[in-house]
Image (cartoon, rainbow, N blue to C red):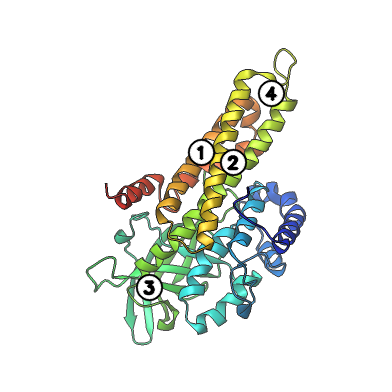
Amino acid sequence: MDILHYTDEHNDFRQRLRNFLAEEVKPFADQWEKDHIVPREIWNKMGKKGFLCTSVSKEYGGLGGDFLYSAIVCEEMAATGQTGLAAPLHSDVVVPYLDEYGSVELKKKYLPGCVSGEVVTAVAMTEPGAGSDLSSLQTTAIEDGDEVIISGSKTFISNGILCDIVIVAAKDPAVQDPYQALSLYVVEAGTPGFDKGKQLEKMGWHSQDTAELFFNNCRIPKTNLLGEKGYGFLMLMGKLQQERLVCSMGALYGAEVCLKQIVEYCKTKKDGTGKPLSKSQAVQFALVEMAADIKIGRTFVDKLIADHIEKKDIKTETSMAKFWTTEMTNRVLGKSLEIMGEDGMLETNLISRGWRDARVTSIFAGTNEIMKFIISKLMQL
């Protein structure tokens, strides 16, 4: 029995998205990898078709859909083997901060553009000296009349080059408690004092525009504050359940794509005796183990998606899923490369690309070690 129940509207949305990706993304994925960035217009095309920010209400131009639409987008995009177009990050990680905590004025100003693709978003938490530990952030936000002055630097920011607005985590240096000092602010690209640094050259995710961001006495209106001052840490914690679920979904769906590819490869590739690799018992056992891991992961993640839609508190479970699925997909891709041998080393091989793209999944959105630490505390260990 299926855990998730898709309506005709969901299925129609999936087919339209699949057709769009086949025409507008897949044919260009290799070139985008070489360019180390996706073209800005692909965001506009995706937004125009209604594939961005599906959870945003119709009042602001969105679909007003449930989280199943987000799952569909994540799954279909994983099937392209292309990681540069970070639509799930934009739609399901960054924009929800603006949608839930932004003032009516901020929502009216930015949400329609987020939906249409005219406004690409990023969230800036990580700094050169602080990653998973938000209490160590050094970027400051000092009030000056009707303005806030932001100073500091951020790094490893996805969508850092193309972003039109960025949600910045910054602290009030006058507040001693690092958790109560943190607030979230919306900063527009082009604001004096806000500069985008170089695009970072990475092991994987070559077409993803990951960058350093610099804030040098960057003045923004006080009204660009999200929620209440000093509640930044609580807001970030409140959204981590969905962020970790999105990470788990992406890892799982990537493993499923890999399994299809490696099974097809083994059925067609001949060994030294002229038999398909799939007739080797050692290869069969390896593929069966992959399939079992993926089936277990699919059952777990689908249940979490259903629970998340019902607004259940599944922080522990999503932390578990984040570390388990990302470790699993790295195992699946690594074993697939071993089976393929020298063929797996080719740049044009999607499994090779998937392997290097998958490695970071155990690091971003909180390292897997941090996930295990969080779970140990929730288990009162």
Do residues under tags 1 and 4 come within 8 Å of each other at their CB atoms?
no
Q: Name the spot of residue 193 as percent of width and height, x first.
A: 43, 73
Apparent side of residue 190 relative to residue 341 in the rendered image (left or right): left
- Precedes in sequence: disc 1 or disc 4: 4
The amino acid type of the residue labelled 2 equals Ala
Q: Name the spot of residue 312 as percent of width and height, x first.
A: 46, 61
Do residues under tags 1 and 2 come within 8 Å of each other at their CB atoms?
yes
Residue 143 in the image: above or below residue 158: below
The amino acid type of the residue labelled 4 equals Ser
Disc 3: which residue: 150
CA distance for labels 4 and 3? 58 Å
Residue 199, which numbered label? none
The amino acid type of the residue labelled 3 equals Ile
Q: Residues within 10 Å of mark 3 (few under 14, many from 20)?
A: many
Closest to the camera, between mark 2 and mark 3, is 2
Residue 302 in the image: above or below residue 139: above
The residue located at (39%, 67%) in the rendering is: 169
Secondary structure state at the residue bearing disc 2: helix
Secondary structure state at the residue bearing disc 1: helix
- Precedes in sequence: disc 4 or disc 3: 3
Disc 2: which residue: 255
Judge whether residue 286 can be spotted in this image.
yes
Residue 109 in the image: above or below residue 355: below
- Precedes in sequence: disc 2 or disc 3: 3
Do residues under tags 4 and 3 come within 8 Å of each other at their CB atoms?
no
Disc 4: which residue: 278
Judge whether residue 118 can be spotted in this image.
no
Disc 1: which residue: 328
